[in-house]
Amino acid sequence: MARKALIVKALYKEPKYKTRKYNRCPLCGRARGYIRRFGMCRLCFKKYALQGLIPGVRKASW
């Protein structure tokens, strides 16, 4: 779990330079493994995809 201070910092404080901006998962606050297309980290993505809560996503099998 991400520290509360880092989550708040990323959400509210604008960085001095725009290249310093980084994405965080809005659900758990994780900064790494962020999937832009779905707007969440890989762990939350897997959890919600397996539950069927993300439309158009399902587990691959071949």
Image (cartoon, rainbow, N blue to C red):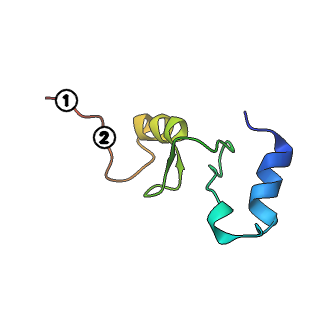
- Amino acid type at circle 1 is Ser
Left or right: 35, with 5 as reference point: left
Which residue, given by chain and number where applicable, does mark 1 sit on? 61
Q: Quadrant of the N terminus?
A: top right
Q: CA distance from mark 1 to mark 2?
A: 9 Å
Q: Which mark is residue 58?
A: 2
Q: Residue 26: x percent and y percent?
A: 65, 52
Name above or below for residue 32 compared with residue 21: above
Q: Nearer the viewer, residue 47 or 33?
A: 33
- Amino acid type at circle 2 is Arg
Left or right: 49, with 27 as reference point: left
Q: Residue 17: x percent and y percent?
A: 71, 70
At horizontal 13% and vertical 29% (from top left) the residue drawn is 62
Q: Secondary structure at mark 2?
A: loop
Q: Residue 53: x percent and y percent?
A: 45, 46
Q: Nearer the viewer, residue 49 or 10?
A: 10
